[in-house]
Image (cartoon, grey):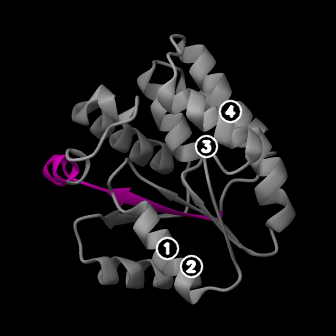
Amino acid sequence: MYIIFEGIDGCGKTTQIELLKKIREDIVVTKEPGGTEFGVKARELLLHSEIKSPKAELLLFLADRAEHYSEVIKPNMDKLIVSDRGFLSGIAYAMSAGFNLDFLIELNKFTLDDQLPQKIVLFEITKEALVERVGQREQDKIEARGYEYLLTIQENMKKVAKRMELDYILIDAREDRELIHKKIIEYISK
């Protein structure tokens, strides 16, 4: 089963993936961008370089997604695959740059050979909690765009999930860590 954990920075995706790794031996954990050798280089470019063109940024994310699918997802479809981010956030970020949603959906389906994740764990966080969690650390290029920008991305993720009628669970990131973990286990076990 292919599952993506989605949400903006500071919402607890990585923490929950680490908890899941402790109880599932059959898990393949990966991330976008950065889940392949190419992805590590793409991630560095995306988060720390001065890419000016929204088109260049979109195409770099898509190139990473295609490579990630080919190298990590497709060969492991017989296992539990959990990706820290995926196409949903990719579409949400590209929407904020003004790209057409239908166009973005088609591009992402193309990069994934029409193999969308079976389940999505989508984390939602309030501005107050976001400021508390992200405010104290050094910010990358995307986080530096501001809290309102990140919250817009969060709303875009929810819109895309609904529009595409994806199988997802919406998690309140402010809830207790163990309660969230329990909800995730129940959801992926269905």
Identified by mark 1, the residue type is: Glu
Q: Which residue is mark 4?
A: 62
Residue type for callout 2: Lys
Q: Residue furthest front?
A: 138
Q: Is residue 90 above or below residue 116?
A: above
The answer to whether the residue labelled 3 contacts the one labelled 2, judged by CB atoms less than 8 Å apart, is: no
The residue depicted at 53 percent of the width and 16 percent of the height is 51
Check residue 21 in the rendering and tell me which mark sits there, or answer none: 2
What residue is rendered at 60% in x and 25% in y? Answer: 58
Question: For the magenta stretch, what is the residue range?
Answer: 118-132
SS under mark 2? helix
Q: Earlier in the sequence, mark 3 or mark 1?
A: 1
Q: Secondary structure at mark 4?
A: helix
Residue named by callout 1: 18
Distance from label 3 to label 2 (Cα)?
20 Å
Quadrant of image for the N terminus: bottom right
Q: What is the number of the mark on residue 177?
A: none
**Are the residues at dot 3 and dot 1 in contact (C-beta closer than 8 Å)?**
no
Looking at the rendered image, the disc whose residue lies closer to the viewer, 4 or 3, is 3
Q: Please say if 94 is above or below 24.
A: above
Q: CA distance from mark 4 to mark 3?
A: 10 Å
Pick whichever of labels 4 and 2 is earlier in the sequence.
Answer: 2
Q: Give yes or no for contact between labels 2 and 1 (Cβ–Cβ under 8 Å).
A: yes
Amino acid identity at mark 3 = Pro
CA gap between label 4 and label 2 equals 27 Å
Instruction: Say which of marks 4 and 1 sits in front.
Output: 1
Mark 3 residue crowding within 10 angstroms, few (<14) / some (14–19) / many (20+): many
Asked whether the beta carbons under mark 4 and mark 1 sit within 8 Å of each other, the answer is no
The tag on residue 33 is: 3
The spot of residue 85 in percent (x, y) is: 54, 51
Residue 122 in percent (x, y) is at 43, 59
Q: CA distance from mark 4 to mark 1?
A: 26 Å
